[in-house]
Image: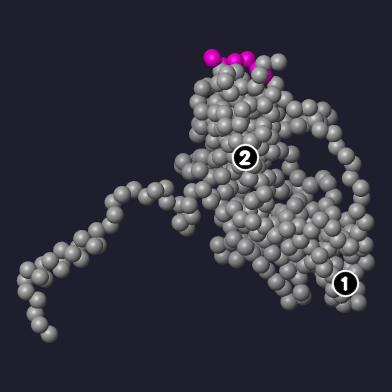
Amino acid sequence: MPRLSLPVLLLGLLACAHASIPDEKPPSRPPTREGAPDSSRFVLIRAGSNLYSRADVGAELLNEYKAPPTSGVPFTNVFRLVDEHRNWLELESLGDDDDLHCELGLRPLRGLRLKLFAPVESLVPAVARPVSLTWTDGTALSLEPGVPAFPGDGPGRSVAVASRLRFPFSPPDGAVADWYPASTHAPVPKSASLHLSRESLLMGQLRYGDAAVAFVGSLDPTLLVASSVPADFKTALATVQIRCARFTVRVPSPEVRPFKPLLGLLGTESEKGPAPRIGAKVYWRDGTEAGEVIGEFHFDSEEQPAGDRRCFQKALRYRDPKEADLGPSLLHLCLDPADAPPSP
């Protein structure tokens, strides 16, 4: 093998050293866990959590009501996770992107993209990747990313909540995390010839693996059966597809019943309040920028101006007059006069 001359050898070493020098330019976006891009991270925030206009408990408080407990499992709202600041989460409201998520954004904020901050303890874990579990008795449970996954009754146990149904389960490693990516979801059937009886749900007769489906909430769900086959002479295996979850349960055969849909009642459209211009910037009352209007949005009423800007308010929760007072829940935002609704 011929020897390389010293100059050639030095040139080769310099070329290798140059090739190994890392690019010192900053990345185009901050690095995130598991390499996920910033815009793909979404989190679930416990309903009733305090939300602030900046990462400071002395900042303007957006939402102060406390959601009433429901069978020990609270409701959640979806936000995009912009960044993390020690004990704070920097969030952005969804605007109009609810269809990509299992839970809803804060509904009164539809049409707005607001920057908000929440204490990190308000975070609820979520299913972060598809989960598919099967058991030898023919039962099964599938969960899609974005389903809330609360701590369960023991190590390695979680409780998923989808469409107000409660599913105890043991998640595979890495299936539950602090954030999840948005994704499309399996369609939910709008009609069927069979359904599971209300009594079978309330009595814990919808069994899968070593657990049972339970109900969380006040409105009885209609569980349409996608398929049903006899398991033995007393029970059936019934499969149900709901938003972000599909499950096959063993249930007493008489509880799989013919379904007769009820005619819905026509609702009346409520009167709409003042609407800002789409594309308008919105501001907190202290003058800092809060976000922008990205779709149809209506305030409830106008209030006192802040400097040169006109200000408006919007209720974040509609309370029954018979309910106990759960605290203030008003959104206060201001607009430049050119972007504000016409004066009455």
Q: What label sits on residue 95 in the rendered view?
A: 2
| Residue 48 placement: quadrant | top right
- Where disc 2 sits, the SS reads loop
Residue of label 1: 235
Figure check: 233 above or below 52: below
Count of number-bearing discs: 2
Residue type indicated by callout 1: Thr
Determine crowd level at label 2: few under 14, some 14-19, many 20+ residues with C-alpha closer than 10 A: many
Cα gap from disc 2 to disc 1, whole angstroms = 45 Å
Contact check, label 2 and label 1, Cβ < 8 Å: no
Q: Is residue 303 magenta?
A: yes
Nearest to N terminus: mark 2 or mark 1: 2
Judge left or right: residue 59 versus residue 328. Answer: left
Magenta stretch, main secondary structure, is strand
Percent from the top left, x then y, of residue 162?
72, 54
Query: Can the viewer see residue 130?
Result: yes
Residue type indicated by callout 2: Gly
Location of the N terminus (image quadrant):
bottom left
Q: Residue at x 45, y 52 (%)?
A: 32
Judge left or right: residue 164 versus residue 251. Answer: left
Q: Is residue 109 magenta?
A: no
| Residue 17 placement: quadrant | bottom left
Percent from the top left, x then y, of residue 43?
58, 48
Q: Residue at x 49, y 48 (%)?
A: 38
Location of the C terminus (image quadrant):
top right
Q: Residue at x 57, y 32 (%)?
A: 279
Query: Can the viewer see residue 213?
Result: no
Percent from the top left, x then y, of residue 327?
70, 28
Percent from the top left, x then y, of residue 127?
62, 57
- Where disc 1 sits, the SS reads strand
In the image, the segment drawn in magenta is 302-308
